[in-house]
């Protein structure tokens, strides 16, 4: 039965992964870094494609760039999609091993063979994957490595403390060398380890091995191609507020107040179940004194488990980006409680038949969808392909201003003829006030003065950017020369266009040539 469960889980996760087979805004920047490294043998430490004020760049995702570029270059779209499905499945697979590890500890009298007796409920994992769908199963992004390493660390730490096996902790600092060069989310691992130290201290257990591991893991951060400044940048990055990045906004903030309902239901369900379990423990005590009851509850708690769940829940409320970590931890630590209270119940035969039909349908649908999806999709509403093609086809050189979301795409497509103002790496690569200048151009009354300061020749904006678009339409210095369904290209009037070539609106052409670029260091 365990094999059927894993097959169903793999196909289902693959389907969720392939349903979001579009390109991330920053994926183009990852390809540029990877291409530059494999052609020159060097890593970029400055943004050579920007005409805006830049600074020394410490790329905390350079390792991911090499992986993404090499897979795409050798195996194409299919390779990237398969890699994405595999790394997400590996994350959930390790999560199931944590659950089995904890069950062996909780029920030592039961001899469980993890290959035969898993007692996994596919419906639980459907709800789990759905709750994290927006973040985990979105586009191909570097944080996929962070999710994988996080559950590897969680498994290692649980195995260490439950089996009193401190020797296995060597995995953490060694893996940190890789993790910290793949994605800045490596600090979630350090945070998790810190919570284990506090929790085990409160559990009155030995914490010296964890402290040593924590120190060694921090030391592992210094093994990188940029030196100590890279570590300083990583520490600095975790303090940034990121007001312009939507996924760093609060879960119940204005942007997400009525959204992400699946995760909110998950969090509410987990919190409610935990409260019910604790309340029953409180009421089932024979002691009459309320204070003694609370003391007994505290003594019976696994402090490590409680602290991790509470902190991860609070962090997920503060930032949407943390949602998956709470979901992973709650599944790992509470699955057995949920199984005993909810899932391990005898159901009527017709309900069991419905479950079997659901599982078979899930397998069939997932298999069909998985084998037929082999291409990464590009959407005309997501990137200004037509406008970029206009500049390229007419050999128009100069500086391009656009919303920073499209910066890396335009850099990938238009370099060396055109330079961009900035892209999504604004906190890493550019001067801190550059994002404010973007806001001035889009919103302030002195927008025109700011445009002149930056020596901008071309502007590509979305049609729904009403204020700036209407200003440019009625300004004598700018002319709209190209418009697709979603974007408009404005050209400064002193740039002469004689019989310009008009690019095709057939999006099949752009799908066919989506990875073409003039960046070539050979």
Image: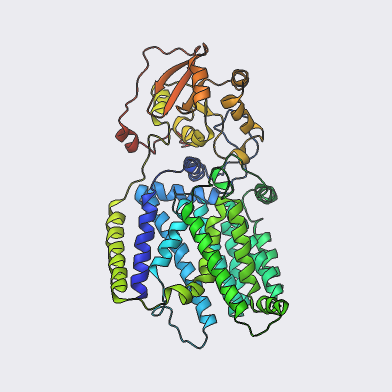
Q: How is the image coloured?
A: rainbow
User: Which residue is nearer to you in this view: 109 or 154?
Assistant: 109
Please say if 97 is above or below 402: below
Q: Is residue 231 above or below residue 121?
A: above
Q: Is residue 180 visible?
A: no
Q: How many marks?
A: 0
Please name the residue shown 54% across and 56% down the image.
323
- What residue occupies the far bottom of the structure in this picture? 109
In the displayed structure image, the side of residue 8 where residue 92 appears, left or right: right
Q: Residue at x 42, y 65 (%)?
A: 125
Relative placement, left or right, of 271 versus 116 is right
- Please state which of residues 204 and 313 is positioned toward the viewer in this rendering: 313
Place of residue 104 in the rendered image (x, y in percent of width and height, measured from the top left):
51, 81
Residue 59 appears at what percent x and percent y? Answer: 59, 45
Horizontal side of residue 232 vs 6, given as left or right: right
Percent x, y of residue 423: 54, 36
């Amino acid at each position: 039965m365990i094999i059927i469960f894993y097959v169903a889980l793999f196909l289902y996760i693959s389907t969720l992964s392939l349903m979001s087979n579009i390109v991330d805004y920053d994926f183009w920047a990852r390809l540029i870094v990877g291409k530059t490294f494999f052609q020159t043998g060097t890593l970029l430490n400055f943004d050579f494609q920007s005409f805006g004020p830049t600074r020394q760049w410490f790329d905390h995702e350079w390792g991911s760039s090499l992986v993404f570029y090499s897979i795409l270059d050798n195996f194409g779209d299919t390779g990237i999609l398969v890699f994405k499905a595999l790394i997400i499945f590996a994350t959930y697979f390790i999560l199931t091993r944590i659950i089995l590890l904890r069950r062996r500890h909780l029920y030592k009298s039961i001899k469980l063979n993890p290959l035969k007796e898993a007692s996994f409920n596919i419906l639980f994992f459907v709800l789990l994957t759905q709750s994290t769908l927006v973040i985990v199963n979105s586009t191909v992004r570097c944080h996929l490595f962070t999710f994988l390493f996080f559950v590897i660390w969680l498994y290692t730490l649980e195995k260490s403390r439950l089996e009193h096996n401190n020797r296995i902790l060597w995995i953490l600092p060694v893996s940190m060398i890789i993790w910290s060069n793949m994605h800045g989310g490596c600090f979630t691992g350090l945070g998790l380890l810190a919570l284990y130290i506090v929790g085990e201290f409160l559990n009155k257990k030995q914490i010296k091995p964890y402290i040593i591991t924590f120190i060694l893991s921090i030391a592992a951060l210094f093994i990188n191609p940029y030196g100590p400044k890279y570590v300083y940048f990583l520490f600095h990055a975790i303090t940034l507020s990121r007001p312009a990045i939507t996924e760093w906004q609060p879960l119940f903030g204005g942007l997400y107040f009525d959204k992400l309902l699946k995760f909110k239901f998950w969090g509410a369900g987990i919190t409610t179940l935990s409260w019910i379990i604790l309340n029953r423990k409180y009421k089932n005590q024979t002691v009459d004194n309320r204070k003694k009851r609370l003391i007994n509850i505290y003594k019976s708690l696994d402090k490590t488990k409680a602290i991790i769940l509470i902190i991860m829940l609070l962090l997920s409320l503060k930032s949407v980006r943390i949602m998956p970590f709470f979901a992973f931890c709650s599944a790992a630590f509470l699955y057995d409680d949920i199984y005993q209270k909810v899932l391990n119940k005898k159901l009527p035969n017709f309900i069991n038949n419905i479950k079997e039909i659901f599982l078979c349908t899930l397998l069939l649908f997932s298999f069909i969808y998985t084998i037929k999806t082999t291409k990464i999709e590009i959407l005309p509403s997501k990137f200004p392909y037509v406008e970029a093609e206009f500049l390229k086809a007419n050999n128009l050189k100069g500086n391009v201003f656009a919303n920073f979301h499209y910066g890396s795409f335009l850099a990938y497509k238009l370099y060396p003829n055109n330079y961009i103002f900035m892209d999504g790496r604004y906190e890493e690569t550019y001067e801190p006030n550059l994002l404010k200048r973007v806001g001035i151009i889009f919103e302030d009354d002195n927008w025109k003065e700011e445009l002149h300061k930056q020596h901008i020749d071309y502007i590509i904006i979305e049609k729904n950017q009403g204020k700036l678009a209407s200003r440019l339409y009625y300004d004598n210095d700018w002319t709209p020369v190209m418009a697709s369904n979603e974007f408009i290209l404005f050209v400064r009037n002193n740039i002469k266009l004689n019989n310009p070539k008009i690019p095709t609106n057939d999006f099949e052409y752009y799908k066919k040539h989506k990875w073409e670029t003039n960046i070539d260091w050979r």
